[in-house]
């Protein structure tokens, strides 16, 4: 508005702003997958400069978004991708879109993978009639209302059909009571959820056990010393051998007499 001495003159200056007029994102995204978002823009027809929308995620470790997306000059909507990771549990992530002084936020529900049964803790053996605890372990926090199936291989240990987990818990403990089998009985206890499972073996000692194992009884052999034989002297004297004299040979004289030589006198001269 301008003033002078004669009249009041009014000028109108209309300025159209580039604005975001609407946004949309996927309501939910599975873990380790790709989702999409879209921003509806209103642009000034005479705008010649490149325009960008800034994006941020409240938790990039769960949901990644690009830092900037370009606004098409023809005024088409801005489309962008979002990449999810596997969170410990399903949760919302906030995506913030900023254009100039304008900010819009959207919520994306990122669905985590299902927890896996990783281990069943149980004692190695129990006496018949004894109560004991087993603990089931999960790979990540449980979701609300999660239950794990439980199966026993033998009636020596009776188990419930399932074990309930509280939300965000990674372990659950249940108390069982062994039966009274006549003989020692090895029982397998298996917990499962979906495609995952884990088990533990528990030995139930029978009503008349031969030994109560600490783990596996090892008997230390008793060495019985070997007695050296006692030599009892014989009182019977050893007889000296009797020598039978050999008969001296008898010389039988020969009947033919030995002729004595006849001496012939030498004549004297």
Image (cartoon, rainbow, N blue to C red):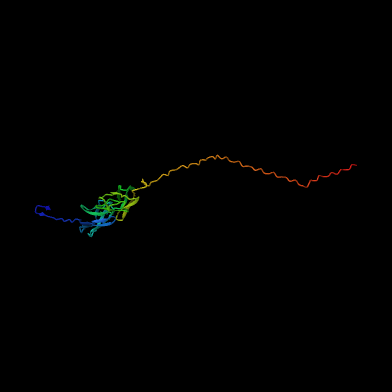
**Left or right position of 266 against 142:** right
Residue nearest the viewer, comparing 266 with 24: 266
Residue 128 image offset from top left, x and y in percent: 32, 48
Residue nearest the viewer, comparing 6 with 237: 237
Q: Residue furthest left?
A: 6
Does any portion of residue 28 appear in the rendered image?
yes
Residue nearest the viewer, comparing 209 with 218: 209
Residue 118 image offset from top left, x and y in percent: 32, 51
**Left or right position of 5 against 155:** left
Residue 49 image offset from top left, x and y in percent: 24, 56
Name the image quarter holding residue 41. bottom left
User: Compared with residue 264, is residue 148 higher up or lower down, i.e. above or below?
Assistant: below
Residue 141 image offset from top left, x and y in percent: 27, 50
Name the image quarter holding residue 233. top right
Does any portion of residue 205 appear in the rendered image?
no
**Left or right position of 159 against 16:** right
* Number of numbered tags placed on the structure image: 0
Work out which quarter of the rendered image holds the C terminus and state it: top right
Residue nearest the viewer, comparing 121 with 131: 131
């Amino acid at each position: 508005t301008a003033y002078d001495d004669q009249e009041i003159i009014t000028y109108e200056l209309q300025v159209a702003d580039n604005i975001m007029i609407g946004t949309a994102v996927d309501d939910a995204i599975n873990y380790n997958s790709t989702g999409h978002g879209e921003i509806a823009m209103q642009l000034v027809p005479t705008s010649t400069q490149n325009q960008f929308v800034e994006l941020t995620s409240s938790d990039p470790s769960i949901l990644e978004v690009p830092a900037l997306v370009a606004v098409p000059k023809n005024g088409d909507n801005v489309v962008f991708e979002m990449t999810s990771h596997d969170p410990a549990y399903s949760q919302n992530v906030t995506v913030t879109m900023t254009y100039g002084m304008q900010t819009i936020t959207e919520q994306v529900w990122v669905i985590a993978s299902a927890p896996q049964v990783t281990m069943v803790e149980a004692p190695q053996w129990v006496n018949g009639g004894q109560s004991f605890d087993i603990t089931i372990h999960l790979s990540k926090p449980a979701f609300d209302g999660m239950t794990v199936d439980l199966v026993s291989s033998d009636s020596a240990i009776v188990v419930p059909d399932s074990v309930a987990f509280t939300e965000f818990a990674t372990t659950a403990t249940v108390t069982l009571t062994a039966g009274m089998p006549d003989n020692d009985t090895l029982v397998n206890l298996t917990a499962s959820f979906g495609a995952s499972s884990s088990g533990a073996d528990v030995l139930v000692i029978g009503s008349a056990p031969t030994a109560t194992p600490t783990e596996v009884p090892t008997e230390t052999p008793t060495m019985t010393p070997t007695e050296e034989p006692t030599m009892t002297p014989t009182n019977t004297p050893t007889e000296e051998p009797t020598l039978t004299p050999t008969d001296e040979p008898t010389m039988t004289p020969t009947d033919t007499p030995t002729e004595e030589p006849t001496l012939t006198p030498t004549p004297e001269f």
